[in-house]
Amino acid sequence: MWRNERRIKVMRLLKGIGIFFLAAFVIIQFFKPDKNVSKKVSTDAITSVLMVPQNVKVVLQNACYDCHSNNTRYPWYVNVQPVGWFMANHITEAKDKLNFDLFGTYSHRRQLSKLKSIAGSVKDESMPLFSYTLMHRDARLSSTEKSLLIDWALKTKDSLEAAK
């Protein structure tokens, strides 16, 4: 008899905890972060200030721009919190490090540094992030695409250095 009463109390407690978490989950759905979507074409975009061949531009758009530009293509699950909050935070941090739409506003030295970082990040496969490529197959870089980006970034860096 004592065991049954204890089980009933435990079940009520678990039910209460479950209801609490379900209610909290429903409530947080009403608090959505702002989306990273700009309708403007930036005159400071990397494609406006540097020579970016079309094949490089396509790779950058598929593998980099969702996090490193002012226009993110959002998947359906971004509307489920806390996933949306996580993604908004991740995009903000990524844009703080490199924003292709603001590349022209960077100092000459910073532009050189960013081009070197692009090549290094692609070469050591720290970019694009593995977690991103899990959900975005088109962001998985082939060896040809990696070479293309690395070569372009380093050659562009070298030409910028020579021009100064």
Image (cartoon, helix red, strand yellow):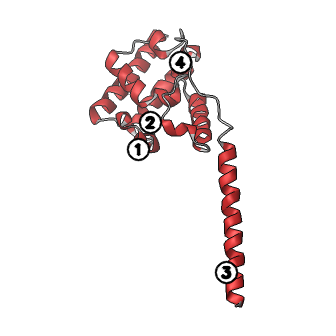
Q: Is residue 125 visible?
A: no
Q: Is residue 123 visible?
A: yes
Q: Is residue 39 left or right of residue 33?
A: left
Counting from the top left corner in percent of width and height, residue 41 is at 52, 11
Residue bearing mark 3: 7
Residue bearing mark 1: 134
Q: Quadrant of residue 9?
A: bottom right
Name the N-terminal-most of marks 3 and 2: 3
Counting from the top left corner in percent of width and height, residue 92 is at 61, 32
- Amino acid carrying label 1: it is Leu
Q: Secondary structure at mark 4?
A: helix
Name the N-terminal-most of marks 1 and 3: 3
Residue bearing mark 4: 101
- Amino acid carrying label 3: it is Arg
Counting from the top left corner in percent of width and height, residue 50 is at 44, 12
Name the N-terminal-most of marks 1 and 4: 4
Q: Secondary structure at mark 1?
A: helix
Name the N-terminal-most of marks 4 and 2: 4
Q: For the residues carrying marks 2 and 1, which lies nearer the camera in this image? A: 1
Whether 77 is drawn above or below 97: the answer is below
Residue bearing mark 2: 121
